[in-house]
Image: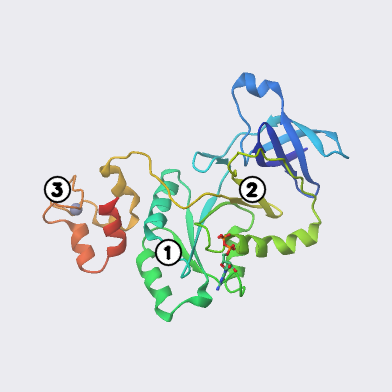
Amino acid sequence: MQGRILKGVGGLYEVYLEGKGSYACRAKGIFRKKKIRPNVGDYVDIDILSETDREGNITVIHPRKNSLIRPMVANVDQAMILFAVHEPEPNYHLLNTFLIMMQQQNVPVAICINKMDLADPEDAVYIRKNYEKSGAGVHFISAIEGDGMEEIREILDRKTTVLAGPSGVGKSSLLNSLVKETRMETGSVSIKIKRGRHTTRHSELIHIARGTYVLDTPGFSSLYLPEMEKEKLKDYFSEFAPCEGKCRFLDCSHITEPDCAVKKAVEDGEISRLRYDDYVYT
Ligand code: GDP
Ligand code: ZN
């Protein structure tokens, strides 16, 4: 039976089988010997030990398409980062850091701005203008009123998506509205894996619909990039790409050098100043 690891705590894994629900599984000793650890997001084969207790053994871990380190999850197609247009105000530095982090791991990102029912008319224009060249798509929704939810469903459809966002932006509201319909449709069984008292909350995959999974990533209020040279950083700002080779110095850092094409593009309004200032600050 092939399934997907939704979460793992203390050597116990919740494996979800489409149409059958979840089983609490342990990994066989042979993985330990081979130094392979089952990961959230892994496609695995299990032997069902008991249907009544919903227990099984993981016997095979299928090859991973990719494997992210932050957050820890395998077989990811894309990431979605959620912010609110207000309450709380968007933290653009956090957003930019997230974009860099995902680019480093080759994961495309969709930016999703929630609570558009609270927006002023110019808010969407401002955000779109600053991020249209960032390489990430920008989408506006109201999880409470249901606006834009169709578009979000389409983006997520049949993919595995890392969903991140600081607390208070409406992540639970969004997930609830995505899960609500399917839970009622399938009546799928979910097991509860007991959590140790002092363990921090782990990332967890949520089954939304057939083939559609979202990783709920907790504890996302600050992010730190691994030490990286400034020379590398500029490669992660997609809007700088058209300026490539046009600065006086080939190794221009676009910060203090004269005749810098990037700085000129910022002056001309072709590159977002918000994004550029954050590049300098990072
Ligand atoms: P989380 O911390 O990201 O999981 O955020 P929650 O889903 O718990 O939402 C935080 C607060 O924002 C709650 O009071 C929600 O009712 C509210 N909220 C969520 N989505 C919307 C929205 O689209 N519009 C408005 N006005 N409030 C929302
Ligand atoms: Zn330059």
- Provide the secondary structure element on which disc 3 rests: loop
Marks 1 and 2: in contact by CB < 8 Å? no
Q: Residue at x 65, y 39 (%)?
A: 197
Residue carrying label 1: 90
Residue carrying label 2: 205
- For marks 2 and 3, the one nearer the N-term is 2
Residue most extreme to the front: 197
Locate residue 1, reporting x and y percent.
78, 37
- Give the vertical position of 11 relative to 116 (above or below): above
Disc 3 C-beta below 8 A from ligand 2:
yes
- Give the vertical position of 41 relative to 210 (above or below): above
Q: Mark 3: which amino acid?
A: Phe
- Give the vertical position of 115 relative to 230 (above or below): below
- For marks 1 and 3, the one nearer the N-term is 1
* Colour logic: rainbow
> 69 or 67: nearer the eye?
69
- Provide the secondary structure element on which disc 2 rests: strand
Numbered label attached to residue 49: none
Q: Residue at x 16, y 53 (%)?
A: 247
